[in-house]
Image (tube, helix red, strand yellow):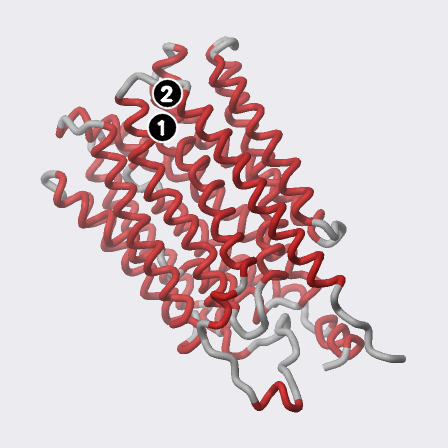
Amino acid sequence: MTLSSSAAASAAVPWRQDARTMGLIGLAHGSSHFFHLLLPPLFPWLISEFGFSYSELGLLVSVFFVISGVGQALSGFLVDRVGARPILFGALLCFAGAGIVAGMAQGYAGLLVASALAGLGNAPFHPVDFTILNKRLSPQRLGHGFAVHGISGNLGWAASPVFMTGITTVTGSWRIACVCGGLLALLVLAIMVWNRDALDDRQGAWAHQDKPTGAAALVPEHPMAFLRLPSVWLCFSFFFWTTCALSAIQSFASPALQKMYGLPLSLTSMVVTGYMLCGAAGMVVGGFLVGRVVRLERVISLCLLASGALLVVVGLGLLPGMGAMVLAALAGVGTGLAGPSRDMLIKRAAPPGATGRVYGTVYSGLDLGFALSAPVFGALLDQGLVSGIFYGSAAALVLGVVSATWVGAGIAARSSRVVPAPG
């Protein structure tokens, strides 16, 4: 397909059709992020009932993300083979099961099973989401699709603490909150099934790159060939480091602020919601930046460094308690601004025909970051190194900037080697 014919085809796609797909994927992605925080907002209640330490609770987060990370890398291949839609339906069923099992848990073993089920459900979401977006959306709206995807994830993270702690506070039972979370997953599944035609990735290829022709088409590439690309592993490391920072904020910023500034947990629990809402606002702006910036890694670097600086100030303990909470929440703006540029950077780094595999591998860095960092930050809190939550988060963002810079430099070097066709 030539450039002009591609533009004409995409222009013929109604905005309503693209918006419907964006909205459904946004709802699905928000649901997956909601279940990242099925248990962490309930940590104070779990400590009260079972006497767990923060290190033990951090291990629950690790179980979730170890299973999710391994499953995410594998599910990318499955998505490329059988399609994204049926896997999406199965993932939502796993979430429903996780909520119900958590609500029935009588100890640590039951919570481990719930974490494992939730991790299994979370595993395929990024390969599923990005495969559907890349195949169903018209090219000129893909940046907006990435922005909606990122915003919905942040909204899922923001909603979960309010939902889980709110129901627990009103009913007096964290178990009821978990079961309600499972019922919410079933509601989302019903919506997806009802609108399944808009999620059929086998019926769209608007954003596909052209398939190779001639001699190149006769030599099929090995399915694992993409693993030889340095850009794939640099993107993986970028996700690992930025997720380490996010893990610190999501799971431990609330108790850290409570210990540092003497604020009640009912108030500090809102910092995660504030951070995610600020991130969502940043992503709205970031979605427009994607189509206007060539060197995306520069946008990413500037935004993440600004967020890291704000977290360092919070860790210094120089501000009044409410001021520290506001500053920690505002750090989400920078990470949000960087989000759509991050997703587009990965698309540019990915070879054609390997969308699910590349996104599955790269986003498994997110799961590994959560899995390894949660026990580390939990141990810092157990040892009384409270400010280390914010210093460690800022340091991880700086390391993420290094990885993004290398990815961008590699893409720029590859582009400079492209020889224009003779006119």
- SS at circle 1: helix
Residue positioned most to the right: 423
Location of the C terminus (image quadrant):
bottom right
- For label 2, the residue is 256
> What's the CA distance linking mark 2 and mark 1?
6 Å
Packing grade of label 2 (10 A; few <14, some 14-19, many >=20) is many
Query: From the viewer's perspective, is 128 left or right of 163?
Result: right
Q: Residue at x 36, y 58 (%)?
A: 123
Q: Residue at x 47, y 78 (%)?
A: 222
Q: Residue at x 63, y 49 (%)?
A: 341
Quadrant for residue 270, please give it: top left
Count of all numbered marks drawn on residues in the image: 2
Question: x%, y% of residue 362?
Answer: 47, 56
Tag 2 near tag 1, CB within 8 Å: yes
Q: Nearer the viewer, residue 328 or 38?
A: 328
Q: Is residue 166 visible?
A: no
Q: Residue at x 30, y 50 (%)?
A: 66
Quadrant for residue 192, please give it: bottom left
Query: From the viewer's perspective, is residue 335 above or below residue 98?
Result: above
Query: From the viewer's perspective, is 311 left or right of 183?
Result: right
Quadrant for residue 327, please give it: top right
Circle 2: residue type: Ala
Query: From the viewer's perspective, is residue 86 above or below residue 72?
Result: below
- For label 1, the residue is 252
Query: From the viewer's perspective, is residue 332 above or below residue 320?
Result: below
Query: From the viewer's perspective, is 122 left or right of 1?
Result: left
Q: Is residue 120 visible?
A: yes
Question: x%, y% of residue 11?
Answer: 74, 71
Circle 1: residue type: Phe
Question: x%, y% of residue 197?
Answer: 49, 73
Location of the N terminus (image quadrant):
bottom right
